[in-house]
Image: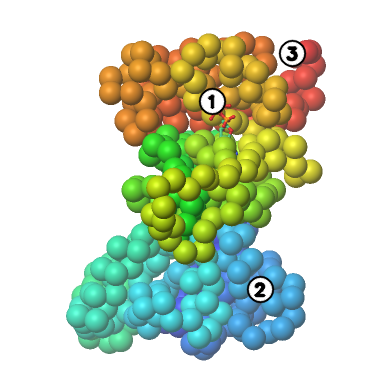
Amino acid sequence: MADLTGKKLLLIIGGGIAAYKVLELIRRLKERGASVRAVMTGAAQRFVTPLSVGALTSERVFTDLFDLNDEREIGHIRLSREADLVVVAPATADLMAKMASGLCNDLASTALMATDKPVLVAPAMNPKMWQHPATARNVRQLKADGIYFVGPEAGEMAESGEAGIGRMAEPAAILAAIEEHLAAIEGKAATQPLKGRRAIVTSGPTHEPIDPVRYIANRSSGKQGQAIAAALAAAGASVTLVTGPVALAAPAGVTTIAVETAEEMLSHVVAALPADIAVMAAAVADWRVAKPAGRKLKKTGKTPPALKLTPNPDILAAVATHANRPELVIGFAAETNDLVKNAKAKLAAKGCDWIIANDVSATSGVAGGVMGADRNRVHLVVAAGADPWPEMRKAEVAARLVARIAEHFGDSRPRRRDEAEAHPS
Ligand code: CTP
């Protein structure tokens, strides 16, 4: 028997005759140590009573979206998020239609819309209803939305004389599917070492206006910063990417904020604090035009206009000295000479923890140069020294950096007492 101790399930019971089988499912889940919270639709309560369900789950049963006490105590958002897995059994044609079209007019459908957890459905309905094109359409939609299915099976229906596909999977089969999904979720957690960490990444150039049509910019493509944002997200971190104007699509799974100027970038970065990790990869313009013209500058006379520049805020330094400073602040240094020496000086001057120093000189050895390219050659510079990395793709630089970040947070986890005694530091 699998051990499900500590696993949390939200069981949404739909209104069908198969609801009685769910009592058996709850009993088996509880035997294995899982905790089960149940939500019942109005129709479900006509088939089994909340009293029986509550007696088996040993928890109160949730039935009403507009129960103010519930909203204060727990609410549908928490209800659906505190579970490891949401199971819908029996999933009626009606409940699946609501799920497929995003309707939420009761607690069950609202919890299903609000959840950020995997959902497993066990359909149960009359074979004609299962075969109906509308149901087939909804099943396709739900599968495309990433909803998992167990059953239905073929067999006799509760209605006499009817047979075909539509019977809810047996409790043992639903249990096996639940165990399989919980194991997969656990496996995923192992590959997401930064789960629960927040990261802010800056990327791309900034555009500093001269007048409404002209600006000062640089050649940064944003490729390295975006690769880092994507790699942090893949490692489970929740990532805010603040990017200057680039010709790249926003990376998936990342909150992306597009800005133009250094000042806008700074305000969005500060607004995204607190965070655990900051990676400042943007090529921020060091200066901006002190007073950008409100109208397009015209060619009047023979002398070109003189642009009076003023320094931009240093975003990296501002984050590194902020009251809400992230635990790990990482900057970039683009150097054409004395790479490590300059990067170390920058580390101290900006107050950051690590610097990724890249050689942007024509002699960097990276074919075609680094700016805008897909490859990069960097040194990871920390106060104690510099680690030269071989030339590799920017996505690989990102993956290697994120592995180092994960290592840092892994090491900084409070050590258990027995570990501390075995390995005194
Ligand atoms: N940076 C920043 N805000 C600025 C300038 C730079 O956040 N206004 C960050 C960059 O994102 C990068 C690091 O600081 O992480 C680079 O520092 P910077 O001093 O601009 O480096 P270089 O451009 O290499 O500087 P220098 O011209 O001094 O060699």
* Relative image position of residue 119 (x, y in whole percent): 44, 62
> In the image, residue 104 lies at what x, y percent?
48, 81
Q: Position of residue 243 (x, y in %)?
A: 48, 48
Q: Position of residue 88 (x, y in %)?
A: 45, 69
Alpha-carbon span between mark 1 and mark 3: 37 Å
Up the image or down, 132 lies above or below 364; here it is: below
The residue under label 1 is 333
- In the image, 31 versus 39, the foreground residue is 39
Q: What residue sits 62% from the left and 43% below the top?
A: 310
Residue 418 visible somewhere in the drawing: yes
Q: Is residue 125 above or below residue 367?
A: below
Some atom of ligand 1 lies within 8 Å of the CB belonging to the residue at label 1: yes
Residue on which the image places disc 2: 75
10 Å crowding of disc 1: few (<14), some (14-19), many (20+): many
User: Mark 1–mark 3 contact, CB under 8 Å?
Assistant: no
Whether residue 127 can be seen here: no
Give the SS element for disc 1: strand
Q: Residue at 45% across / 31% down in the picture?
A: 398
Could you tell me how many numbered marks the image carries?
3
Q: Which residue is mark 3?
A: 423
Q: Secondary structure at mark 3?
A: loop
Alpha-carbon neighbours of circle 3 within 10 Å: few (<14), some, or many (≥20)? few
Say which label, 2 or 1, has the lower sequence index.
2
